[in-house]
Amino acid sequence: MPSAFPRPSPRSEVRLQKYLADCGFGSRRACEILISEGRVAVGGRAVVEQGVRIDPDRADVTVDGRPARRERIIHVVLHKPAGFLCTSRDPHGRRTFHELLPPDLGARVYSAGRLDWDSEGLLLVTNDGDLAHRLIHPRHHVEKTYRVWTPVPLDPAWLARFTSGVDSEGERLAARSVREVGRDRQGAYYEMVLGTGRNRQIRRMFEVAGLPVLRLLRTRFGPLDLGDLPPGRWRPVTDTELAALRDLAGA
């Protein structure tokens, strides 16, 4: 049976989920969910199957009846404080990172990767769906660096165990590197580098070692450095940083 959708030129065609991601509707995976839920239409016809290809210059695409158009691409470094969610909306009314961005940003943006509600630090905020998808995909192993505070120093033997891997909730969790960087009256703090991240991975690893995490701050994401950016503030990603991100992601 012929397709109900016009066949675009091979040179101009893109997958529908990629086009939606480029329009700021989330990651490609999130856009695949929008399609499967029947919320996307092309030329007035609902699309529920994956893999439909369109000509972005000719196709009439809508999401929930609203036109889907490519937006100005935005890349922002945000210093997320604790107490904010990395989501667009929360049914319980909790604060989200969107409240920290200017209302006239001019695009629907989302975070490339997440920080827990009680974690803080560097968050890459963008509407560049293709780049975000590549950066958070496990095969690219984008390094993320964290500062971790504990109430008492960790037994040095655990540093080696963390890099070789520990078991938590049926998963093997490992860090690329971990080192103690200082102590004070409140305890000790460490620098930990992850290649791939699991849900609440650092907190779970320290729980295996019998220590709670008092504070968790992400200081680097690939080539991006938090530097002295104050909590709750943001800055544009520089051209040099963006080129390094694209190179890292093979984009």
Image (cartoon, rainbow, N blue to C red):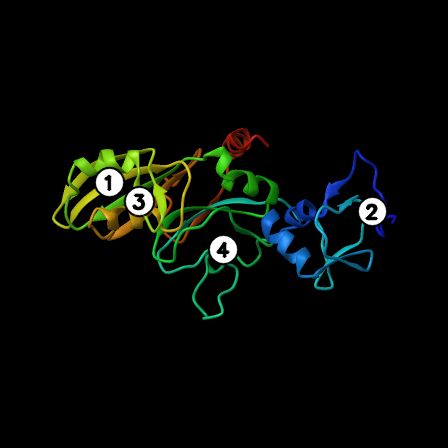
Is residue 177 shown left or right of residue 70?
Answer: left
Q: Identify the secondary structure beneath mark 4.
A: loop
- Which disc, if any, is residue 101? 4
Badge 2 crowding class, 10 Å Cα cut-off, few under 14, some 14 to 19, many 20 or more, is few
Res 226 → quadrant: top left
Evaluate if marks 4 and 1 touch, with contact meaning CB atoms under 8 Å apart.
Answer: no
The amino acid beneath tag 1 is Tyr
How far apart marks 4 and 1 lie (CA) works out to: 30 Å
Say which of marks 3 and 4 sits in front: 3
Q: Identify the secondary structure beneath mark 1.
A: strand
Q: Quadrant of the C terminus?
A: top right
The amino acid beneath tag 4 is Leu
Determine which residue is flagged by label 1: 190
Res 156 → quadrant: top left
Label 4 vs 1, first from the N-terminus: 4
Badge 4 crowding class, 10 Å Cα cut-off, few under 14, some 14 to 19, many 20 or more, is some
Determine which residue is flagged by label 2: 58
Determine which residue is flagged by label 3: 167
Q: Residue at x 60, y 54 (%)?
A: 108
Q: Identify the secondary structure beneath mark 3.
A: strand
Badge 3 crowding class, 10 Å Cα cut-off, few under 14, some 14 to 19, many 20 or more, is few
Q: 167 or 117: which is nearer to us?
A: 167
Evaluate if marks 2 and 1 touch, with contact meaning CB atoms under 8 Å apart.
Answer: no
Label 3 vs 2, first from the N-terminus: 2
Residue 155 point in image, percent of width and height:
15, 40
Q: Residue at x 83, y 41 (%)?
A: 8
Say which of marks 4 and 1 sits in front: 1
Label 2 vs 4, first from the N-terminus: 2
